[in-house]
């Protein structure tokens, strides 16, 4: 029996984001922040997007939320082409797609009270009357774990966790279907992180939300995700269901990320451990061939000449690595043959 696969809610098709950077000699160099990135997200799913700082994760999220216009590729939402959407289509899309920022304080206007901040999306989209907007603000505050009195406070009067609850509440005011969550707990204490992550899971279950969850923290990705997309220097290098990826990572970069997690729980069960060599190269001077070859302990001549394509190596599991010749074989096995 074939498993039913729902139509994607969000489709990122070969997206690119290139910037021309002027040097001292006025000769422009191309910075490839995102380069040919493709990803589909199903309704109600959480896809975790993980990678080191500077790999392009946030840029992908901002393109998906229509905060940035890509220099190449296409974006589809619920089957409709949105890359070159009209102003009216974009206005409709703003209500369906919302963004939660890493630093809630910098994204909240410090001169507005919380009630005004939460009411603003309703006013902008011309939704409801004054009294109904006020009622919805109070109801949303209570739903994210704050009482109605917070509507009279200013952002500087709140803790980091409370401000992030406001950021989430503001994103939900117009009843979106898709949230881009950009490192939403990285600036919070561990105990507060757990509260926010559990709140996000509860809200997703209640409202049928779809998440693109961006993080560099593999433990957070493991807890939140249904599938995980691993990104390196602007490219997608591995994509798999969360359990398949953490139990059997295929790409050497993914193996290095998981090896770096302190031993505990499922991590103790892993026998293989590798380490990425050196530092992340500059996106202004990308290595030839495979972009990970300068740091990969298994790199060989082909890796330095030819960029690997993302290919399926198991059911629902894809990786971009030349070391795979037999489906399901790990890079460690391939390298040691």
Image (cartoon, rainbow, N blue to C red):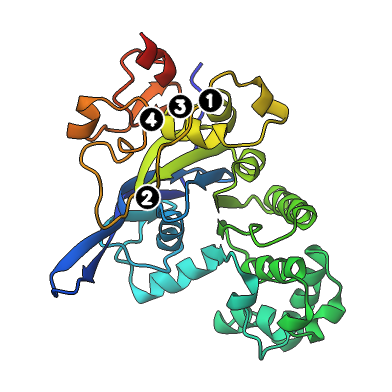
In the drawing, what numbered circle is on residue 12? 2
Is residue 174 visible in the rendered structure shown here?
no
Residue 173 image position (x, y, % from top left):
66, 70
In the drawing, what numbered circle is on residue 273? 1
Give the side of residue 138 with respect to residue 167, left or right. right
Q: Residue at x 47, y 49 (%)?
A: 52
Q: Residue at x 43, y 18 (%)?
A: 332
Q: In front of the other: label 1 or label 2?
A: 1
Is residue 257 visible in the rendered structure shown here?
yes
Query: Considering the numbered disc 3 on the image, is that residue within a helix, a strand or a loop?
Result: loop
Residue positioned most to the bottom = 111
Q: Which residue is mark 4?
A: 319
CB within 8 Å, label 3 to label 2: no
Query: Considering the numbered disc 1 on the image, is that residue within a helix, a strand or a loop?
Result: loop
Residue 159 image position (x, y, % from top left):
77, 72
Of 323 and 117, the residue lying toward us:
323
Count of numbered tags: 4
Residue 146 image position (x, y, % from top left):
83, 69
Q: In front of the other: label 3 or label 1?
A: 1
Q: Earlier in the sequence, mark 3 or mark 2?
A: 2
Q: Residue at x 55, y 33 (%)?
A: 258
Q: Earlier in the sequence, mark 4 or mark 2?
A: 2
- Mark 1 and mark 2: Cα distance apart in space: 32 Å
Q: Is residue 132 above or below residue 189?
A: below
Q: Which residue is mark 3?
A: 316
């Amino acid at each position: 029996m074939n498993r039913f696969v729902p139509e994607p809610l969000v489709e990122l098709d070969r997206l690119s984001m290139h910037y021309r950077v002027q040097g001292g000699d006025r000769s422009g160099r191309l910075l490839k922040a995102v380069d040919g990135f493709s990803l589909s997200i199903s309704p109600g799913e959480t896809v975790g997007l993980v990678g080191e700082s500077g790999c392009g994760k946030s840029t992908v999220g901002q393109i998906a939320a229509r905060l940035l216009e890509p220099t190449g590729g296409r974006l589809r939402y619920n089957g409709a082409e949105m890359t070159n959407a009209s102003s009216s289509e974009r206005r409709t899309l703003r209500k369906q797609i919302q963004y939660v920022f890493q630093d809630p304080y910098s994204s909240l206007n410090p001169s507005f009270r919380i009630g005004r901040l939460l009411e603003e999306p309703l006013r902008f989209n011309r939704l409801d009357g004054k009294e109904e907007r006020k009622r919805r603000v109070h109801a949303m505050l209570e739903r994210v774990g704050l009482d109605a009195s917070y509507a009279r406070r200013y952002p500087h009067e709140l803790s980091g966790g409370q401000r992030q609850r406001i950021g989430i509440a503001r994103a939900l005011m117009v009843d979106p279907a898709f949230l881009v969550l950009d490192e939403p707990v990285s600036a919070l204490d561990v105990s507060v992180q757990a509260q926010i992550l559990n709140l996000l899971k509860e809200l997703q279950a209640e409202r049928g939300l779809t998440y693109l969850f961006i993080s560099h923290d593999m433990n957070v990705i493991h807890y939140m995700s249904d599938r995980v997309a691993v990104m390196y220097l602007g490219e997608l290098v591995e994509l798999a269901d969360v359990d398949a990826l953490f139990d059997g990572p295929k790409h050497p970069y993914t193996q290095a990320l998981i090896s770096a997690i302190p031993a505990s729980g499922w991590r103790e069960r892993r026998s293989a451990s590798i380490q990425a060599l050196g530092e992340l190269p500059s996106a202004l001077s990308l290595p030839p061939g495979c972009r990970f070859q300068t740091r990969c302990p298994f790199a060989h001549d082909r890796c330095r000449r030819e960029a690997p394509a993302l290919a399926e190596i198991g059911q629902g599991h894809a990786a971009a690595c030349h070391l795979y010749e037999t489906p399901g074989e790990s890079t460690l096995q391939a390298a040691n043959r």
